[in-house]
Amino acid sequence: MKTDRQLQQDVIEELRWDASIQSAHIGVEVRDGVVTLSGQVDSYAEKFAAADAAKRVAGVKGVAMDLEVRLPGSSKRTDSDIAKAAVTALEWNVSVPMGAVQVKVDDGFVTLTGEVDWEYQRDAAASSVRPLLGVKGVNNALTLRPHAAVKDVKGKIEAALQRLAHEDTKDVTVAVKDGTVTLSGTAHSYLERDTIEAAAWNAPGVHQVVDRIIVAP
């Protein structure tokens, strides 16, 4: 098992490796396997990329974000400009149902509301607005439209986890009640935990996933 010092160095190297991140402005601290990223970045997309980079490092149990988005002068936009750009970006994304998402912008922070059918559509909506110039943060408040009852959701999710062919899935327990999936057990990495949760979201009839999986490298 890696020490906190080893994890810190690995995260620093991963941030340097990612060309989309200005790693010189990001501080990295690790305590008991939990990484804290601090400092300033020029965009919300860069902040998101930094979190993803830390999650990719083997041995990381969690990531705490203390990064501040400070837009350079050339990137500043009015809330009206950002809202118009967000609406256009959503309209151009084929994974986002037309007219299903409403946009609100307050001081550069975008809130998405409305109803969609699938989790991948929620993710697609957030991905559409995340890289827009002037955006400081995204609150994805989209909800999933209730589906008709589906038989054996638990079995479908367990089968999907088996197809992933990860050792981690053997230590995961799936419980389903009224469209809510609860995942418990252990995963060997933060990235594997995210993969398992994504698989659960893909099951028909699921409108909420409670992830209680513990990362235990």
Image (cartoon, rainbow, N blue to C red):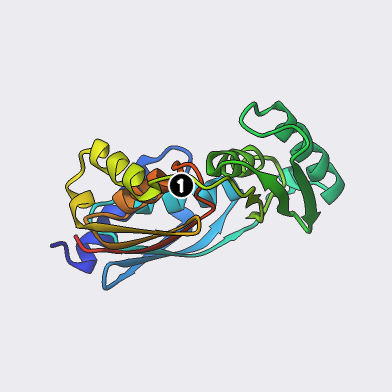
Most extreme residue toward the bottom is 31
**Residue 148 to residue 187: above or below:** above
- Quadrant position of residue 130: top right
Q: Secondary structure under badge 1?
A: helix
Residue 66 drawn at (x, y percent): 51, 67
Residue name at image x 48 percent, y 46 percent: 49
Residue 44 visible in the displayed image = yes
Residue at the (64%, 41%) spot, across then down: 125
Residue 178, image x, y percentages: 50, 59
Q: Which residue is mark 1?
A: 201
Q: Is residue 22 visible?
A: no
Instruction: Please identify the residue farthest to the left as the structure is shown.
Output: 1
For badge 1, the amino acid type reads Trp
Measuring 61% from the left and 41% from the top, which residue is drawn there?
117
Give the x, y percent position of residue 51: 44, 53
Residue located 17% across and 66% down the image: 3
Task: Report the side of 212 relative to 128 (left or right).
Answer: left
Nearest the eye: 134 or 125: 125
Label 1 packing within 10 angstroms: few (<14), some (14-19), many (20+): some
Residue 153 pos. (x, y %):
40, 47
